[in-house]
Every structure is written in C-alpha cells, then in structure tokens.
Amino acid sequence: MMKWLEYGRAASLCERHDCDEDHHGSGQAELTYLHFRHMVEQAEAEAVVLAVGCVSKAMGRDWRAALAWLERRHASDFKPQERLELTGSEGGPVQVSDAREKLQAEVDGIAKRLLD
C-alpha cells in the first residue's frame, strides 16, 4: 500500500501528460495510483471528521475529553508546562569544566613517552 501511495504522490507531482513512468500505472488500469491516493486521503479526512465528532460528543459527558481537546488545540494555554532543572551536588549549581586542557596534557604525556 505504501508503494502505491508513493507512486500516487509522484504522479500528482508529475507535470508531463505523456509520461510513461511507473508512477502512472498502466493506461488500461481502472484504478490509477493517483486515484488510489485520492481515495485514501478522502478516507483519512472522513475519519478525522468522525473522530472530532466523537470527541465533541464526549466533552459534554467527560471533562477529560474536553481537557484533551484543549491541551491539543490550545497547547500554549492549556498543556501542562514541563520544566527540567539540573542541580549539582547538595542542590548547588552544576559544575561545568572544559576537558580540553586535561586531554591535551594526556596527549602530550603519551607523545613524550613515545618519543623517549
């Protein structure tokens, strides 16, 4: 199915009417890849409408459905804000060090031992 949808996408982007690429399918086929893609997109759109209707009906009976809708539709206002805070030992600041100097010293020590 995914290959057919891929062919349908390629056919929709193709601007040549006389194109004989695989993405158009055979000229004698009753269902072209492009037509198949349109049918799948239509079915998906209808499923979205059905799902929105179910959520809308549920919002009157269950506050969780209303909250779920608000969190998704108006996330900046209703989605719980998650915060992550990092602390060092004993709740102090995180100590950050630059390891380049330490690594350079190790490389220099190894180079000196190899040369000796």
Image (spheres, rainbow, N blue to C red):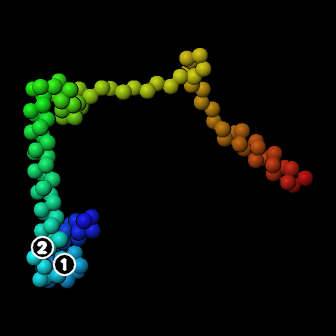
Q: Which mark is residue 114?
A: none
- Where is residue 110 drawn, in percent x and y? 81, 49
Which residue occupies 72% across, 44% down? Answer: 104
Which residue occupies 26% across, 28% down? Answer: 79
Which residue occupies 12% across, 28% down? Answer: 59
Q: Is disc 2 surrounded by few (<14), some (14 to 19) or many (20+) residues within 10 Å?
A: few
Count of residue discs: 2
- Where is residue 10 drawn, in percent x and y? 22, 70
- Where is residue 6 drawn, in percent x and y? 25, 67
Work out whether residue 6 can be spotted.
no
For discs 1 and 2, the disc positioned in front in the rendered view = 2
Q: Are marks 1 and 2 in contact (CB under 8 Å)?
A: yes
Quadrant assignment, res 105: top right
Q: Amino acid at mark 1?
A: Gly
Residue at mark 1 to residue at mark 2: CA–CA distance: 9 Å
What quarter of the picture does the N terminus occupy? Answer: bottom left
Quadrant assignment, res 64: top left
Q: Is residue 84 left or right of residue 89?
A: left
Between residues 110 and 14, which one lies in front from this camera angle?
14
Residue denoted by label 1: 25
Q: Residue furthest front?
A: 61
Q: Residue furthest top?
A: 90
- Determine whether the residue tagged by mark 2 lies in a helix, strand or loop: loop
Q: Is disc 1 surrounded by few (<14), some (14 to 19) or many (20+) residues within 10 Å?
A: some
- Determine whether the residue tagged by mark 1 lies in a helix, strand or loop: loop
Work out whether residue 78 can be spotted.
yes
Between residues 13 and 20, which one lies in front from this camera angle?
20
Residue denoted by label 2: 31
